[in-house]
Image (cartoon, helix red, strand yellow):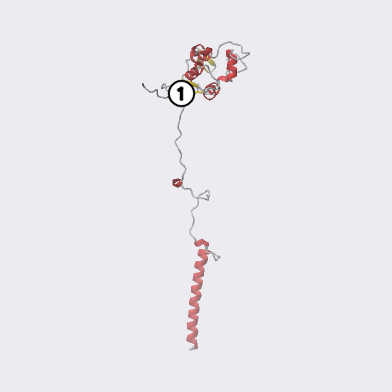
Amino acid sequence: MNDVRKMVYGTLIGFFAVLLFWFSIIYISSCGFTLTCRQAAPKVDRTPIPTLIPAGHLESQMEVGAVEFNKCEVSADELIGAWVSAASPESEAFPFSDVDGGPCQGTFAQDIQPLFVENSLWYAGAIGCVSCHNSGLTERSAGLDLTSYEAMLLGSGRAEGGAKGKDIFGGGNWEQSALHAFLVNKGFAPEGHSAESSPISLIVFAGEVTDVQATPTP
């Protein structure tokens, strides 16, 4: 009788020992030697750059309005001509017409001076006008200093102390001005202006469109 009991108890103890060992192996392979078992937690998808607040483009309350392009398309020489014809103001806006004849207005600082200063403007690889037409008055300058508005006034004799030579502004007559002579009558060449070269028709975006008030009909 005692032998039978020992056999039964031994079988039960062995069974539970094997069961405990089997569960231990499963736990260790899944959770490691920890009691928290974080290895069994589901993986979290992460972006390469962690963010505190998930991006929600569709939920954005920001309203982006369309940017209105209000520049006028105009020939560069006609723009300069309109400025000269308007008595070549320095700070006041002057009127001009775009390529379609629409009303526009511009200023010297924003629309005229960049035409004399910027490189590769009139043609690819061209140096700015002021590279030759500056206060150094080299042989290539032809007596025109285009570096500033004050220098142009001195060159036209309109400023105190100015020695009038070739009138840059032509007294408000565009076709009689030195600018017209060099921009329209003479062409552009890498070495300067040449009557043998064709004038360049440069189209630029300048000034801004002006509103025209409708005149009531009687």
Q: Badge 1: how crowded within 10 Å, few (<14), some, or many (20+)?
A: many
Position of 168 relative to 65 (above/below): above
Residue in front for this viewpoint, 112 or 118: 112
Task: Answer yes or no: is residue 17 visible.
Answer: yes
Question: Mark 1 is on which residue type?
Answer: Cys
Residue at 51% in and 72% down:
21
Residue in front for this viewpoint, 54 or 152: 152
Task: Answer yes or no: is residue 142 visible.
Answer: no
Image quadrant where one finds the C terminus: top left
Write down the residue under mark 1.
Answer: 104
Q: Secondary structure at mark 1?
A: strand
Describe residue 135's horizontal placement relative to residue 83 as left or right: right
The image shows residue 179 at horizontal and vertical percentages of 52, 15
Position of 54 relative to 196 (above/below): below
Residue at 50% in and 88% down:
2
The image shows residue 121 at horizontal and vertical percentages of 51, 23
Residue at 51% in and 68% down:
25
Describe residue 141's horizontal placement relative to residue 98 as left or right: right
The image shows residue 71 at horizontal and vertical percentages of 46, 27
Number of labels in the image equals 1
Residue in front for this viewpoint, 31 or 104: 104
> Which residue, as the protein is rendered here, is positioned at the far front?
218
> Which residue, as the protein is rendered here, is positioned at the far bottom?
1
Residue at 52% in and 66% down:
28
The image shows residue 22 at horizontal and vertical percentages of 49, 70
> Which residue, as the protein is rendered here, is positioned at the far left?
218
Q: Quadrant of residue 150?
A: top right
